[in-house]
Image (tube, grey):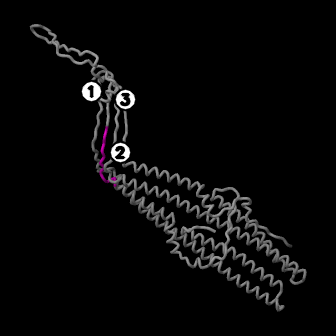
Amino acid sequence: FCGSISISTSAQSDGGKTWTIQECFDHAKDNNLQLKQLQVGERIAEENLRTSEAARNPNVNGSASYGVSVGRNIDPVTNSFSTSTIQSFQPSINSVFLIYGGGQVKNNIALSESQLELSRLQSDEALYNIELSILTAYMNVLLAEEQATVVAEQAQLTSERLARSEKMVKAGSIPKGDLKSIEAQMATDRMNAVSAENAIANAYLFLQQLLDLYEPMQLTTPNVNEVPLSLIEQMNVEEVFQNALAYQPSFKTAAMNDRIAEQRLLIAESGKLPSLSLITNINSRWSSLGRQIDEDADPIEQIVDVEIPSLGTVSIPFGTVPAFERAPFVPQLGDNFGGYMGLNLQVPIYNNRRVKSQVNLAQLDIENRRLMKTDTERQLRRDIEQAFLNAKAAAERYKSGLANIEALRQAMEFTEKRMEVGSGSNYEYFIAQNNLTTAELNQRSAKYEYLFRLKILDFYQGKSISF
């Protein structure tokens, strides 16, 4: 019974591009849909800020009305009664300039500025979370590939051990029954090889899904030398936590939400204060009954009939009046041009408890935001404590692996010395050598895990990640 086991650690990515961790980060930054949506949110916040700043300027609005009146009505131009059908047109321009509004405009601008900054921080936080997920997935791929390599090399050792044992059985050095345990190990190695292939496939799939990338890919394999155990020993949770607080986008986002809640309280309280506005209006009027002097027509002489008892009715000249004609549209607008300017003061007295409720809700929002900020800080500490614990556990496995290798190396040297004096066997030496090689292979996997746990702690502190 003999055979070999082969594992291809790049089975997921034959012919695909080789990606570094930074290229993965850059790809997500340029293509992630969640980030694109948040970028749209930033542009919305910028537009809201421009709207808030424009509230400091007066508004200007134009209006015009046209109507037809029948029966007894007032001519809008002469304000006289008329029974004729009247057409009228009244254009106007209105403007309102807020002189004082209880600080509402200023506070709204400050709020819009904070909301714009919040949008940017939310984009940073989303990018951070995506990069953290990518880093974890990237490391899982490398770990899966390294573990698959270890499984393949262990399987190769088992295969070589089986071949040598078969020769030793034929030579009568060992009993045939000793082959059964090696054959069982071969079967176990085959199962481990299948599991290793599935682990690589799942790790690549998860990374590709994070990147929204569905094409062959492979990762740059880092050149990992010895990783000093002193690296984790030089760290402590409090130091990592304080560094993370200064860098973490989630904590900055929570702090900005707290600030926004306080600004909303100022806006709500401004509803208790009076407001003063300057109001201006420019208008004109046109009427179908409008008349003007006809310069080309002769004046009309007025005759008044007077009843004189001795003479009867006598017509007496009363003077002349000018002749009138229908006034054109544009001259009427010029003649009837007028305007208005005034101040409008509004003093809030009672508004169905609206302002008080808004103030109370704003105060409750501040309290809620502060609790959320505290929760964010505590969650960050929990995450760092867990990451630190994982790194220490990996360091312990790495350290114990080094000690195990040293012990197995001494055991093999002892077996060599026994063979030199004739008290040891080739089989014992083979077993000692196989145990040492297996421990060295496992140590490589432990070294990778320890390195990657350190990278997670570096990432929490905003340090550049490279392999």
**Which residue: 89% across, 83% down?**
172
Q: Identify the residue under disc 2.
A: 58
Instruction: Say whether residue 398 is magenta.
Output: no
| Side of 283 where 445 appears, left or right | right
**The one of 216 and 466 positioned closer to us in this rendering:** 466
**Which residue: 35% across, 29% down?**
89
Q: Nearer the viewer, mark 3 or mark 2?
A: 2
**Toward which corner of the image does residue 358 lie, by quadrant?**
bottom left
Q: Identify the residue under disc 1.
A: 78
The amino acid type, in three-letter code, at marker 3 is Tyr
Element marked by disc 3: strand
Find the residue positioned furthest to the front.
296
Location of residue 75 with respect to 164 vertically, above or below: above
Element marked by disc 1: loop
Location of residue 459 with respect to 440 vertically, above or below: above
Q: Position of residue 45 (x, y in %)?
A: 47, 52
| Side of 131 where 84 appears, left or right | left
The amino acid type, in three-letter code, at marker 1 is Thr
Location of residue 98 with respect to 323 vertically, above or below: below
Q: Which residues are magenta?
A: 270-281
Residue neighbourhood size for the residue with mark 2, other residues' Cα within 10 Å, grouped as few (<14), some (14–19), many (≥20): some
Mark 3 and mark 2 in contact? Answer it, CB < 8 Å.
no
Residue neighbourhood size for the residue with mark 3, other residues' Cα within 10 Å, grouped as few (<14), some (14–19), many (≥20): few
In three-dimensional space, the C-alpha distance between marks 2 and 1, rounded to whole angstroms, equals 33 Å
Q: Identify the residue under disc 3.
A: 66
